[in-house]
Amino acid sequence: MKLTVKELSKQIQHHQILQQITFSWSAGEIVGLVGRNGAGKTTLMRCLTGQYRIDQGEIALDQQSFTTAPAGRQELIMVDPQQNFFKGYALKTVATFYAELYPNFDQKRFSELMAHQKLAPEKRFRDLSKGQQAYVAIALAITSGAKFILLDEPFDGLDLLVREDIIKLIIKANTDHQQGFLIASHNLTELDGLSDRVLFLKHEQLVADISLETFRTQSKKLQLVFRQNQVPKLLSDQGQILSIHGRVIEVFFKAYTPEIDRNLKGLAPVLMESLPLSLSDLFKVEYAYGKDDL
Ligand SMILES: Nc1ncnc2c1ncn2[C@@H]1O[C@H](COP(=O)(O)OP(=O)(O)OP(=O)(O)O)[C@@H](O)[C@H]1O
């Protein structure tokens, strides 16, 4: 199953929030969605689930547009911490709502997940801790049976152990049930370990759609030291300088080629060492070191 988004645009109160957003997302893929505060991540998710009407563009499931085949939206569910209709109800009652709303809701799996966290069915959602609420909301989305699950800041304000429980839940749903996740988060460390791909939103547009595997094979972060004081021009021409401490220069190369390697070695550095790459490096390069800084 594949969701395709083509040239989606959205204005709110005459402000352009999203412009010409195009990407595809297969069930089974975990996709990170990053961007500075206010970049439009939540708005994009709400457009996908139909909470917001889009101004232009098309969203389709297996090439069936939601305009002509709206039933496809049943395959999408969003966990939106700002909107939650079941706060005042006991968990067992919430489960009955979900059973009504989602024909593929898996009551048994939901009960098992609650028991695993020692959450009694009689417990009211609003009486749970923040971490428990986050866990229950994600468990409900997963057991709804929807193939595309949208999580808006799922790790916000949660302690390490709850974050780990939620990550396990996501990985199991992804591996055992081929459920896809679109995860908007500022927590790049968690996204780094989870995502297959990351989408970058900036200035209303999708500026990059990067497979993390490709990123790790094609990009490089180097620590370099040269005899001369001057920073060689090659570094800023071919890469992006992340930091300079005395003579130690950290440089990021988005596409590291054998030619760059040869040219660097030709400059006879005193030290040339690869550093581990992280999603944070990519984020810094996309957002803070771009030609058109924010
Ligand atoms: N219902 C609304 N009414 C007015 N403006 C809105 C509404 N929803 C979103 N916006 C505006 O759209 C822009 C994008 O907001 P959105 O919440 O989608 O960003 P975000 O990337 O999710 O931000 P954050 O990382 O801070 O959660 C913001 O300027 C916001 O003020």
Image: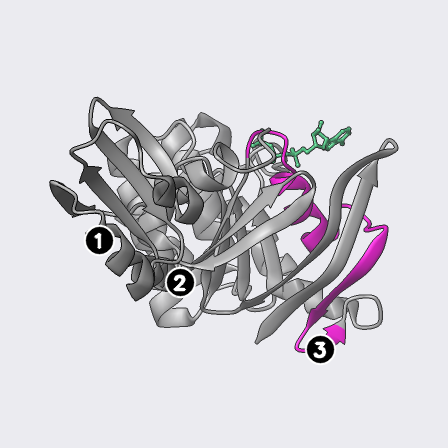
Mark 1, Cα crowd under 10 Å, few <14 / some 14-19 / many 20+, is few
Span colored in magenta: 36-64
Which mark is nearer the camera, 3 or 2?
A: 3
The residue under label 3 is: 63
Q: In which quarter of the image is ligand 1?
A: top right
Which mark is nearer the camera, 1 or 2?
A: 1
User: Mark 2 belongs to which amino acid?
Assistant: Lys
Q: Is residue 134 left or right of residue 75?
A: left
**Residue 166's x, y, as percent?**
34, 46
Residue 283 in which image quadrant: top left
Image quadrant in which the N terminus is located = bottom right
Mark 2, Cα crowd under 10 Å, few <14 / some 14-19 / many 20+, is few
Res. 67 in view: yes
Res. 166 in view: no
- Label located before the other in sequence (3 or 2): 3
User: Mark 3 belongs to which amino acid?
Assistant: Gln
- The label shown at residue 108 is 2
In this view, 250 is above or below 259: above
Asked whether the residues under the numbered discs 1 and 2 touch, taking CB atoms below 8 Å apart as contact, a structural biologist would say no
User: Mark 1 belongs to which amino acid?
Assistant: Gly
In this view, 158 is above or below 286: above
User: Which residue is drawn at the image coordinates 37% and 32% (left, top)?
Assistant: 131
Residue 222 in which image quadrant: top left
Q: Is residue 190 left or right of residue 49?
A: left
Query: Does the magenta segment cover residue 220?
Result: no
- Label located before the other in sequence (1 or 3): 3
Query: Does the magenta segment cover residue 39?
Result: yes
Spatial separation of the CA atoms under disc 3 and disc 2: 33 Å
- The label shown at residue 266 is 1
User: Which residue is drawn at the image coordinates 28% and 55% (left, top)?
Assistant: 263
Which mark is nearer the camera, 1 or 3?
A: 1
